[in-house]
């Protein structure tokens, strides 16, 4: 007789985890592919400052959209809980409030960025030519803000409905359109940097059109009584304040995380060109970890939220264990790959001997990072599904200001290794604090009572 419980031996339960995780992993892979196509297209222009301008401009835009990613996270958690509770009204109301917030924030982003664009670009440094073309890129691309933010909401809503294939199709379609238009506008029509920005702009609005169509198919299945009084429900202040509070806490959490990555880059630059280049190589490999583990985190968001909506305590425990178990296996696979082929991967990214040596010196940190980071990835997904953003925010603040920065300060004599020790402390601090909170809240029944 097997010592494992029957539910843990059930292939259907494991299949449900992969049905949500794998589509998100595959869709994530198209993002770095898009970056490679952008680099290839712009890299064929006559001067290096074209590529520099697109790099600086795209970094700024991606930072803005990434910091506003709370729109997807909060929507996923609230939708999953409504789906679990079989509440069509809450499904509709969550979508309406989140889309309204996305449209308002998209307009505000344009209204703030466009007048301040010269000053914002000036802070980035670089030559006058790089700043000029970065400004051109942002001035065009920023007009996609309403569409890009609404797309985040649509993806979160569909994922909350346990539908990972539609968000995958949406991301892949958007990136494919972007790639094709990149080549057409830049190489075919000679629009240079403005062409690259226009390609992304059009791709975002095309994705929005397809996303609205996908959502409309779901909305048609709702009962007629769900639509009665929808406008008055949308304006209910307690629900709006809950959404705003949830988004505020996730934003603070994301801002702190971005602060740590920015600090690694800026502090690495102070240590020299070789250090910042080597760290860039390792950080690119670190992104591979997120592509794998994010899929299981997204799955945990949807499955945990649904279990909470159903008030299914046993189901909640099962989805936590299943997602964590598979994420640990994937993390161990990354550790094995980096341990066996890390040096070859570094050499494939750069051919500069001094950069390779510096990256290899910190390679052991990359080897262990998947096993250190897997916990915070998964527990982030669990707490998003439970719509417990305040706990995520507090955990991040503790990990940053009691872990990341103190460890870096104490380890400064180690040079660049101090930055990687600090990053490891950040991951461990988040994982430990969230894990302890999750255990306590589940034991006390507070995790199951997350939806209001």
Image (cartoon, rainbow, N blue to C red):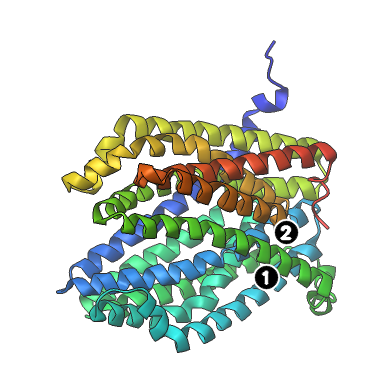
Q: Give the structural element (helix, strand or loop) at label 2.
A: helix
Q: Which mark is residue 20?
A: none
Give the x, y percent position of residue 156. Answer: 62, 60
Question: Residue placed at 56% from the left, 46% from the top?
Answer: 403
Q: Residue furthest top?
A: 1
Q: Nearer the viewer, residue 404 or 414?
A: 414
Q: Give the structural element (helix, strand or loop) at label 1.
A: helix
CA–CA distance between discs 2 and 1? 10 Å
Q: Nearer the viewer, residue 332 or 15?
A: 332
Would you say 382 lies left or right of 129 here? Answer: right
Quadrant of the rendering where the C terminus is positioned: bottom right
Q: Is residue 199 above or below residue 221?
A: below
Give the x, y percent position of residue 168. Answer: 50, 55
Q: Which mark is residue 78?
A: 2
Q: Residue furthest left?
A: 46
Q: Alpha-carbon neighbours of circle 1 within 10 Å: few (<14), some, or many (≥20)?
A: many
- Sequence-first disc among 2 and 1: 2
Q: Quadrant of residue 76?
A: bottom right
Q: Are marks 2 and 1 in contact (CB under 8 Å)?
A: yes
- Total numbered badges shown on the rendered structure: 2
Q: Which mark is residue 98?
A: 1
Give the x, y percent position of residue 114. Answer: 46, 86
């Amino acid at each position: 007789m097997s010592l494992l419980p029957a539910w843990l031996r059930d292939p259907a339960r494991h299949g449900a985890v992969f049905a949500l995780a794998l589509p998100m992993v595959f869709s994530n892979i198209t993002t770095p592919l898009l970056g490679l196509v952008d680099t290839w297209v712009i890299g064929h222009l006559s001067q290096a400052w074209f590529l520099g301008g697109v790099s600086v401009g795209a970094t700024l835009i991606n930072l803005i959209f990434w910091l506003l990613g709370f729109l997807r996270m909060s929507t996923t958690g609230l939708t999953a809980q409504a789906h679990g509770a079989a509440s069509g009204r809450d499904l509709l109301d969550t979508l309406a409030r989140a889309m309204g917030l996305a449209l308002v924030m998209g307009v505000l982003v344009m209204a703030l960025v466009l007048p301040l664009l010269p000053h914002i670009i000036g802070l980035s440094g670089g030559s006058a030519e790089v700043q000029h073309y970065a400004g051109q890129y942002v001035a065009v691309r920023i007009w996609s803000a309403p569409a890009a933010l609404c797309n985040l909401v649509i993806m979160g809503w569909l994922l909350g409905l346990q539908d990972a294939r539609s968000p995958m199709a949406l991301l892949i379609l958007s990136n494919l359109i972007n790639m094709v238009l990149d080549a057409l506008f830049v190489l075919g029509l000679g629009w240079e940097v403005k062409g690259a920005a226009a390609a992304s702009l059009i791709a975002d609005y095309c994705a929005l059109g397809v996303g609205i169509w996908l959502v409309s198919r779901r909305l048609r299945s709702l009962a007629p009584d769900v639509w009665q009084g929808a406008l008055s429900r949308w304006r209910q202040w307690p629900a709006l304040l809950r959404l705003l509070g949830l988004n505020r806490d996730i934003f603070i959490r994301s801002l702190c995380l971005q602060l740590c990555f920015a600090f690694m880059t800026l502090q690495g630059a102070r240590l020299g060109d070789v250090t910042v280049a080597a760290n860039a190589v390792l950080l690119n490999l670190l992104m591979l970890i997120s592509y794998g583990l994010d899929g299981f985190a997204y799955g945990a968001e949807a499955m945990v939220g649904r279990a909470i909506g159903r008030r299914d305590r046993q189901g909640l425990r099962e989805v936590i264990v299943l997602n964590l178990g598979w994420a640990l296996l994937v993390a161990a696979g990354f550790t094995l790959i980096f341990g066996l082929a890390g040096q070859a991967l570094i050499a494939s990214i750069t051919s500069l001997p001094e950069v390779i040596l510096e990256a290899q010196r910190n390679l052991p940190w990359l080897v262990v990072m998947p096993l250190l980071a897997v916990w915070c990835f998964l527990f982030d997904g669990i707490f998003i599904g439970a719509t417990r953003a305040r706990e995520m925010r507090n955990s991040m603040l503790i990990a940053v200001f009691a872990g990341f920065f103190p460890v870096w300060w104490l380890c400064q004599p180690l040079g660049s290794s101090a930055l990687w020790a600090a990053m490891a402390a950040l991951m461990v601090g988040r994982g430990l604090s969230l894990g302890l909170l999750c255990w306590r809240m589940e034991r006390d029944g507070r995790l199951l009572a997350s939806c209001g």
